[in-house]
Image: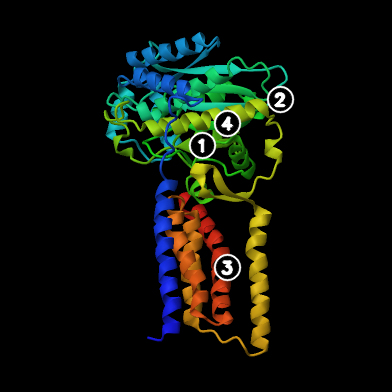
């Protein structure tokens, strides 16, 4: 082998090998849950209290209407009163004969399975044949505040077999600590409301009852923050109306969940409390967070404090504290007037770094390079200096299309995109003609431009 040819090949192989190693390392790091605070950290006392409450509140299954549920409600109310807050218990009676139809409508299914029917039949009813739902609401208000951020979770467990530590007592206890952090703040720029709903596991009935009871809040609430989980792992921005201004607000707050506009689009319809808000006047007003990795314990006796991912609990707490602190110091009255359309993808979400582009900028980044590349190609063809094969175009489509897809594949963007980018960049080391590389770039840009509408059509036709 010619010595001059061997050097670029060795260099290219070395760069690709290093890129693969870096991609794997950063990809794994990106999807790991941030470690909990140490004993000397600022939020360690809140985190420690949170864990103690989760352990106490999820000591046994507490489905809606059960004696154990009454105990948990008492624990939550006592915590709030110790902070000097005045919790409100709001009750709503639903005829048990209508609950099955409401659940079918909420979940969008044709019928309920036998387990769900048996669960409904086991619900305690009053003399009038009603199931009584009891939500808990706390309002932290200041005279000068002109908007509301509503924090939301549920405090019932799935059934008589699940203690519900992850689903969703860790979110409840994260919000309790957030209340603790803001309870004495008399200068809130945005009012903070905290809603803990009953009967989320049976068709989001508690959320439905709250929305029906408070039509006046539709105009006042600027942001709904829903938190739920079916497992552990890092917190993910999942079910939400993808308004760019909300994602930017979240980034400015210091919250560090994993984000991806593609994941949000695919997960736009869900079965958490926020689905009720999304479809009853709060369209475009929400951030929905979930943790769903390692969800084999969901709705089982293994969803206990002992099996719960303690780092996930910290991620819930950090996110809740960050958003509340931002709202407390900033008015959110005009947030819905800010740019809403855009894309977002993880760069280093765990470090709080994400790609955030409003839609005009995203279009410009796609259209301008494509137009320039096409203009250059036309000029070269006019000079008869642009000789490209169909195979080269296909290669460009595959390589750059894969990179584009990987960028939005949240849990593997670095795992795949870094090595692919290295392979594309090191094509220059092979001394390929400029026309060859330009063809790859052109075909790749066109692929990326076509990629979004294809996904949109799929979303509209299938997921909706």
Which one is in front, 4 or 348? 4
Disc with the residue nearer the chain's start (1 vs 3): 1
The local crowd at label 2, few if under 14, some if 14 to 19, many if 20 or more residues have their Cα within 10 Å, is some
Q: Are marks 1 and 2 in contact (CB under 8 Å)?
A: no
Residue indicated by mark 1: 288
Q: Position of residue 129 (x, y in %)?
A: 38, 16
> Residue visible at 62% across and 88% down?
385
Q: Is residue 13 above or below residue 83?
A: below
Mark carried by residue 146: 2
Residue indicated by mark 3: 445
Q: Nearer the viewer, mark 4 or mark 2?
A: 4
Disc with the residue nearer the chain's start (4 vs 2): 2
Q: Is residue 289 left or right of residue 286?
A: left
Question: Quarter-wise, where is residue 188 in the image?
Answer: top right
Mark carried by residue 303: none
Which one is in front, 447 or 35? 35
Residue indicated by mark 4: 323
The local crowd at label 3, few if under 14, some if 14 to 19, many if 20 or more residues have their Cα within 10 Å, is many
Disc with the residue nearer the chain's start (1 vs 2): 2
Q: Nearer the viewer, mark 4 or mark 1?
A: 4
Q: Position of residue 72 (x, y in %)?
A: 39, 15
Q: Position of residue 44 (x, y in %)?
A: 46, 24
Q: Position of residue 272 (x, y in %)?
A: 45, 34
The local crowd at label 1, few if under 14, some if 14 to 19, many if 20 or more residues have their Cα within 10 Å, is many
Secondary element type, mark 2? loop
Which one is in front, 336 or 123? 336
Disc with the residue nearer the chain's start (4 vs 1): 1
């Amino acid at each position: 082998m010619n010595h001059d040819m061997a050097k670029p090949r060795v260099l290219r192989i070395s760069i690709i090998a290093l890129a693969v190693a870096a991609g794997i390392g950063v990809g794994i790091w990106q999807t790991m849950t941030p470690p909990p605070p140490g004993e000397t950290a600022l939020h360690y006392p809140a985190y420690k209290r949170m864990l103690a409450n989760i352990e106490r509140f999820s000591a046994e299954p507490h489905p809606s209407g059960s004696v154990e549920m009454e105990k948990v409600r008492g624990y939550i109310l006592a915590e709030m009163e110790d902070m000097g807050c005045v919790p409100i218990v709001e009750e709503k009676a639903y005829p048990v004969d209508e609950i099955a139809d409401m659940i079918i409508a909420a979940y969008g299914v044709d019928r309920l399975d036998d387990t769900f029917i048996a669960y409904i039949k086991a619900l305690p009813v009053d003399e009038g044949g009603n199931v009584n739902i009891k939500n808990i609401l706390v309002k932290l208000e200041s005279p000068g505040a002109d908007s509301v951020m509503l924090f939301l979770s549920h405090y019932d467990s799935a059934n008589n077999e699940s203690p519900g530590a992850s689903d969703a007592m860790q979110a409840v206890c994260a919000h309790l600590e957030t209340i603790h952090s803001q309870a004495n703040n008399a200068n809130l720029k945005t009012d903070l409301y905290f809603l803990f709903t009953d009967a989320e596991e049976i068709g989001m009935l508690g959320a439905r009852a709250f929305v029906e009871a408070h039509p006046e809040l539709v105009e006042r609430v600027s942001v709904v923050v829903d938190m739920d989980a079916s497992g552990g792992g890092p917190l993910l921005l999942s079910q939400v109306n993808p308004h760019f201004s909300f994602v930017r607000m979240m980034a400015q707050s210091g919250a560090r969940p994993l984000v991806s506009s593609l994941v949000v689009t695919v997960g736009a319809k869900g079965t958490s409390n926020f689905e009720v808000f999304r479809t009853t006047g709060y369209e475009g007003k929400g951030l929905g967070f979930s943790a769903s990795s390692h969800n084999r314990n969901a709705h089982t006796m293994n969803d206990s404090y002992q099996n719960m991912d303690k780092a996930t609990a910290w991620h819930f707490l950090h996110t809740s504290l960050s958003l509340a602190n931002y709202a407390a110091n900033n008015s959110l009255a005009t947030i819905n007037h800010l740019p809403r359309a855009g894309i977002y993808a993880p760069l280093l979400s765990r470090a709080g770094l994400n790609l955030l582009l409003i839609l005009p900028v995203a279009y410009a980044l796609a259209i301008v390079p494509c137009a320039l590349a096409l203009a250059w190609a036309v000029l070269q063809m006019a000079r008869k200096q642009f000789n490209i094969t169909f195979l080269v175009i296909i290669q460009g489509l595959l390589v750059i299309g894969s990179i584009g897809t990987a960028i939005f594949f949240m849990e593997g963007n670095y795992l795949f995109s870094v090595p692919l980018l290295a392979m594309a960049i090191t094509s220059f080391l092979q001394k390929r003609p400029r026309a060859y590389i330009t063809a790859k770039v052109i075909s790749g840009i066109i692929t990326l431009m076509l990629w979004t509408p294809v996904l949109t059509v799929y979303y509209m036709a299938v997921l909706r």
